[in-house]
Amino acid sequence: MTNDKQAIHEVVLGYCRGVDRLDLDLVRSAYHPDALDHHSSFTGKINEFLVWVETELAKYRSTMHFVGNHLAKVDGDRAVSETYAMVVHVGHSPQDEANYTSGVRYIDYMERRDGRWAISERGAIRDWIRSEVNNLSLPPGHVAQGARGQDDRIFKALKLLEGHSSSALPLSAGLAGQGA
C-alpha cells in the first residue's frame, strides 16, 4: 500500500509540475482519458480541461504550486486522495490583477488501470485567496528564472539524467549559463 500511496502522490506532483511548466502532456498524464475535472469555473472532460488550462495560464507570467499535506485512502485499485496546496499566480506586471496566492485542496478519485494510477475525477476546492496586486516584485534579469515549456532547467537536468551513464550527475552541467 505504501508504494500505491507514493504513486498517487507522484500523480499529484506531476500535475503540479505540468501546470507550472505549461507542459500539457504532463498534465494529461495525471488523468485517465475519460477523466472529469471540476476546477474553479470549469467542469468537463480532460481534453476540454486542457484547452481551458492553456487559456487560463496565458493570463499569468508563471504559477507555482507548493504541495503540503497529502493523504490517500487506498481500496484495491481505487483511492481517494486529498492534497493541500498553495498556488502562487504571477501576472505580467506587479499591478496585474492576476497576482494572487490561493489556498487550494485537490480531492481526487484515483484508479489504477493497467498498473497505472491516475485521476478519474478531480474536485479543486479553493479555501482562500490573497491578492498580491502592487505587492509583488519580479526577479531581476540577471538571476536564474524558471521558464514555461521545455526551456525550463528541469527538462535540461532530466535530459542529462537520461543520457548520463554514471551515478554522479553534474548538476552544474544541466544548469550552465542559467545564472545563480
Image (spheres, grey):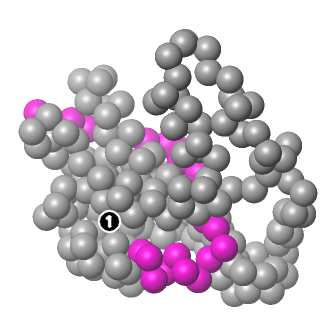
Q: Position of residue 144 (x, y in %)?
A: 80, 51
Q: Position of residue 120 (x, y in %)?
A: 19, 57
Q: Where 140 sits versus 115, above or below?
A: below
Residue at the farthest top position: 167
Task: Report the number of numbered marks.
Answer: 1
Q: Position of residue 149 (x, y in %)?
A: 53, 61
Give whichever of 67, 92 is nearer the camera: 92
Give whichever of 142, 78 is nearer the camera: 142
Q: Is residue 86 visible?
A: no
Q: Can you tell which quarter of the image residue 128 is in?
A: bottom right
Q: Can residue 148 be found in the magenta stretch? A: no
Q: Which residue is mark 1?
A: 123
Amino acid type indicated by mark 1: Gly
Side of 11 where 178 appears, left or right: right
Q: Where 144 sits versus 51, above or below?
A: above
Side of 19 where 114 appears, left or right: left
Over which residues does the magenta segment extend? 53-79
| Residue plotted at (25% across, 69% down) | 46
Name the secondary structure under disc 1: strand
Q: Is residue 4 visible?
A: yes
Q: Where 140 sits versus 171, above or below?
A: below
Side of 70 where 65 appears, left or right: right
| Residue plotted at (9% across, 39% down) | 114
Quarter of the image for the N terminus: give it. Answer: top left
Give whichever of 88, 30 is nearer the camera: 30
Neighbour tally class for label 1: few under 14, some 14-19, many 20 plus, Cα within 10 Å: some
Quarter of the image for the C terminus: give it. Answer: top right
| Residue plotted at (45% across, 46% down) | 13
Q: Position of residue 5 (x, y in %)?
A: 31, 32
Q: Can you tell which quarter of the image residue 48 is in?
A: bottom left
Q: Can residue 78 be found in the magenta stretch? A: yes
